[in-house]
């Protein structure tokens, strides 16, 4: 049996004599995160992301990608690079200490029924 | 409010518009489609056919950009615009079938007419070219159509007025989208500038036809011209582009798109548009 030199052994994809250097990489537009406020919503909700060359284009693209089915009445877009996020590595020091502090929940109060959005 | 799915959280429950555009036979269902007194039904039908064909054919050309646009986001934007125009075409073709008393449906207009029975302007049927050509066409088409629809909002036919009222909001966005790209490319790099100018130059011979009043025209086709010129000049100035000075493309013995005389590529467009409907005449979709 001859030695297999191509991927999968079928000979269709040569592994030798092929230039290994990657081709030119297309310059990408920056990434934007999109927040939409729905008719029923009180807050803008993160719905996804998109690429755009500038802020105005990002707003247009957000309208075209994320409000096609009548979801929103307001859109925010923000460059993903401008968001400072907590790291998964910091999950424990950030969030674990609040897990056992049940007294921080306002469950010891009576909330009147006609007060919305609490 | 559940946040398991953000779309559930922000959409109205049971929003009927989720299913917009499918599952109904008559787009004018529920509207009073009788022809107002003093209006010639055949003439109204002929006019609705012109505007409907413009939207149908230009929408098809925009759909050809699916999988071919430079960026995914713009591909969706162009497809959205094509869908808006398809919606306008459905309403206008349905209106034509009611107004002329033939009760022809939108499908029989779209799929069962021959090339010389289409009444769209030739500008709507131009295909191919690069992104600069597309933006030039989209900007000129939507600027003209928006100015025209604003006139039609006060049409004597209430159905046509309602269709125009709905279309104005859509066309305002189409024009805005195209104008942003027109300025971005025109005022961009030397290459993008020359491509944008090229797109405009090659389109220009087809622009005069938009404003030439046809005998069956319902309103004076020249009415939207002042607004069209004003908007165009403003956008061209911002984009550092020059208004082309080339003359209007002549018709065949004076007959143009509105008379059913089209450019060579139109036959190929129709062949593709109508192929499924003609191969399977009773198909439902």
Image (cartoon, coloured by chain):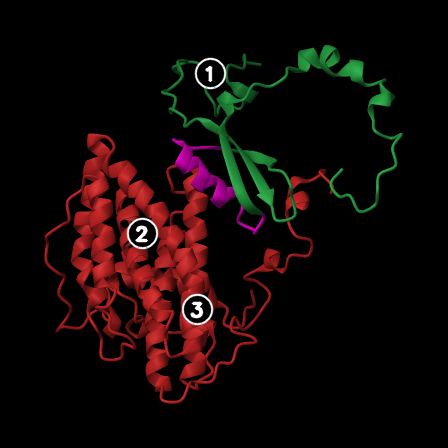
| Mark 2: secondary structure | helix
Circles 1, 2 touching at the beta carbon (< 8 Å)? no
A110 falls in the magenta region: no
Chain shown red: that is B
The residue shown at (49%, 29%) is A78
Q: What is the x, y in percent for residue B23?
A: 60, 65
Labels 3 and 2: the sequence-earlier one: 2
Residue at 79%, 17% (x, y): give it.
A98
In the shown orientation, is residue B123 left or right of residue B270? left
Label 2 CA crowd tier, 10 Å (few <14, some 14–19, many 20+): many
Instruction: Classify the position of the C terminus of chain A by image quarter.
Output: top right
Residue linked to disc 1: A15
On what subunit does the disc labeled 2 rest? B
- Tell me which segment is drawn in magenta: A50-71
Q: CA distance from mark 3 to mark 2?
A: 20 Å
Circle 3 marks a residue in which chain?
B
Q: Which chain is green?
A: A
Q: Residue B111's x, y, as percent?
A: 42, 70
Using the rendered image of the protein, determine whether residue A66 is visible from the camera's viewpoint: no
Which x, y percent locates residue B271?
A: 36, 63
Q: Which residue is mark 2?
A: B138
Q: Residue at x 54, y 68 (%)?
A: B283
Q: Which residue is mark 3?
A: B163
């Amino acid at each position: 049996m001859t030695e297999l030199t191509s991927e999968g052994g079928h000979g269709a994809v040569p592994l030798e004599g092929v230039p290994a250097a990657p081709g030119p990489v297309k310059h990408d537009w920056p990434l934007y995160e999109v927040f939409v406020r729905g008719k029923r919503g009180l807050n803008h909700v993160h719905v996804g992301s998109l690429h755009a060359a500038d802020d105005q284009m990002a707003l247009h693209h957000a309208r075209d990608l994320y409000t096609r089915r009548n979801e929103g009445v307001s859109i925010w877009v923000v460059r993903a690079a401008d968001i400072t996020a907590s790291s998964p590595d910091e999950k424990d020091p950030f969030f674990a200490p609040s897990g056992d502090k049940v007294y921080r929940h306002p469950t010891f109060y009576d909330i009147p029924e006609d007060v919305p959005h609490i | 409010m559940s946040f398991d799915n953000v779309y559930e959280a922000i959409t109205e429950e049971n929003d009927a518009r989720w299913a917009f555009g499918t599952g109904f036979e008559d787009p004018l269902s529920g509207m009073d489609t009788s022809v107002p007194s003093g209006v010639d039904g055949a003439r109204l039908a002929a006019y609705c056919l012109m505007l409907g064909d413009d939207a149908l054919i230009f929408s098809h050309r925009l759909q050809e950009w699916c999988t071919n646009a430079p960026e995914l986001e713009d591909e969706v934007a162009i497809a959205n615009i094509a869908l808006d125009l398809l919606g306008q075409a459905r309403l206008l073709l349905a209106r034509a079938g009611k107004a002329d008393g033939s009760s022809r449906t939108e499908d029989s207009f779209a799929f069962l007419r021959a090339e010389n029975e289409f009444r769209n302007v030739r500008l709507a049927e131009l295909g191919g070219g690069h992104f600069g050509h597309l933006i030039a066409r989209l900007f000129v088409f939507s600027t003209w159509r928006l100015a025209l629809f604003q006139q039609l909002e006060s049409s004597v036919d209430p159905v046509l007025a309602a269709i125009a009222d709905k279309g104005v909001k859509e066309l305002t966005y189409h024009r805005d989208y195209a104008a942003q790209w027109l300025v971005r490319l025109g005022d961009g790099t030397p290459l993008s500038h020359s491509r944008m100018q090229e797109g405009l130059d090659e389109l220009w011979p087809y622009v005069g036809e938009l404003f030439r009043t046809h005998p069956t025209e319902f309103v004076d086709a020249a009415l939207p011209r002042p607004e069209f010129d004003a908007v165009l000049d403003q956008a061209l100035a911002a984009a550092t582009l020059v208004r082309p000075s080339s003359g209007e493309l002549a018709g065949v013995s004076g007959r143009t798109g509105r008379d059913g005389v089209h450019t060579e590529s139109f036959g190929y467009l129709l062949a593709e548009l109508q192929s499924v409907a003609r191969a399977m005449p009773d198909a439902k979709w």
